[in-house]
Amino acid sequence: MSILILPLIFIAIFVYSYKKKVSTYDTFVSGAKGAIPLILSIFPYIATIMIAVSLLRLSGITLFLSKQIAPVFSFLGIPSQLCELILLRPFTGSGSFALLKDIINQYGPDSYITRCACTIIGCSETIFYVATVYLSQTRVKKLLYAIPVALIASFVGAIVACLLCRIM
Amino acid sequence: MNKIWFLMMLASLSVLLVQNPGQVLPQMIFASQEAGKLCLELCGVYAVWLGILELVEKSGLSEKLANLLNPLIKKLFKVDNKEIQKMIALNLSANMLGLGNASTPMGIKAMKSLDNGSGIATRAMIMLIVISATSIQLLPSTVIGIRASAGSESASDIILPTLLSTIVTTGLGIMLVLFCDKFIRRKKN
């Protein structure tokens, strides 16, 4: 069912545009043109954060930290196998999907751990990435409380996710 | 961001200095090459979504969507500008469908027009970051895809837990933003 949603939305958009006498080809081209300058302006931000994350992982700090916080997490009902995932999730999307694949390979796609991991990834975002990329074309330097609030909300979400996966 | 990045770099570089100094530069270059690859991939993704977005805008669909979501947007973001409302409406809808990549260009556009040049994030900007970061997920499409391809028997059974936990995260996020905003205002007065 869900596979059909996107194509249906696209058909609706095309038909509606045609009805409104919008020249679909020209319009799509002029929109797509915006992709290159957009990528050029966000590349340095993506590279900078990816460098820091990859050094953190190489140095073993993330693994060390996740071992340190494992007792706290398991007290809150989060399996210790998911600590590194929760630590890295705010920084890297591709990195957390790589971890998810490891977890699936190790515990199987229908295990409790995998379902928790999937739900945690589904209900969180790469917060640092979103914040830097969204603001890449503004002059904002001070984010005030944005990142702490997003992190706290996502962490509570992870606790809720593990709880829900247990009972559902 | 400056402090966080500095701390991340300082910590990992000092550990690597002892453990594995030869790997530092190759790893940094490897990471930024990966970033380049990612950007190339994203360039294709954004071209598709910006093309669709332009159609949605030119046809007037975005106004309809914005009108639909406007009561909510006005309450949460307190913006009156029609253009910004449209971008926020599109950003939120893409996020809810699990299309994080599609929502990014609209988020960037919305932020650009919300910028007042003061260098400090406004409440509306913070709200947009927090809601995007905790967005309600009607359909976590990517994760379901990964699970299905790994041979799961019921790949979609995470939809309900994900939906419920994102309702919690979005709600909590919005409440925290409102609370912090009030707190800062009171401190100023």
Image (spheres, rainbow, N blue to C red):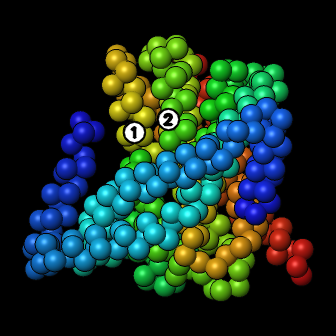
* A153 w.r.t. B76: above or below: above
Mark 1 Cα shell of 10 Å, populated few (<14), some (14-19), many (≥20): some
Mark 2 Cα shell of 10 Å, populated few (<14), some (14-19), many (≥20): some
Quadrant in the picture for residue B121: bottom right
Q: Which mark is residue A97?
A: 2
Q: Residue at x 49, y 48 (%)?
A: B34
Front residue of this view, candidates A33 and A31: A33
Q: Position of residue B162 (x, y in %)?
A: 50, 36
Q: Position of residue A80 (x, y in %)?
A: 70, 21
Q: Position of residue B182 (x, y in %)?
A: 79, 69
Quadrant in the picture for residue A167: top right
Residue B161 is at least partly visible in this image: no
Q: Is label 2 in a helix, a strand or a loop? A: helix
Residue B109 in the figure: left or right of residue A151: left
Using the rendered image, report if marks 2 and 1 lie on a common chain: no
Q: Residue at x 20, y 57 (%)?
A: A10
Which residue is labeled 1 in the image?
B142
Residue A50 is at least partly visible in this image: yes
Q: Residue at x 47, y 17 (%)?
A: A105
Which of the two marks, 2 or 1, is nearer to us in this view? 2
CB of mark 2 within 8 Å of CB of mark 1? yes
For badge 2, the amino acid type reads Phe
For badge 1, the amino acid type reads Thr
Cα–Cα span, label 2 and label 1: 10 Å
Front residue of this view, candidates A43 and A124: A43
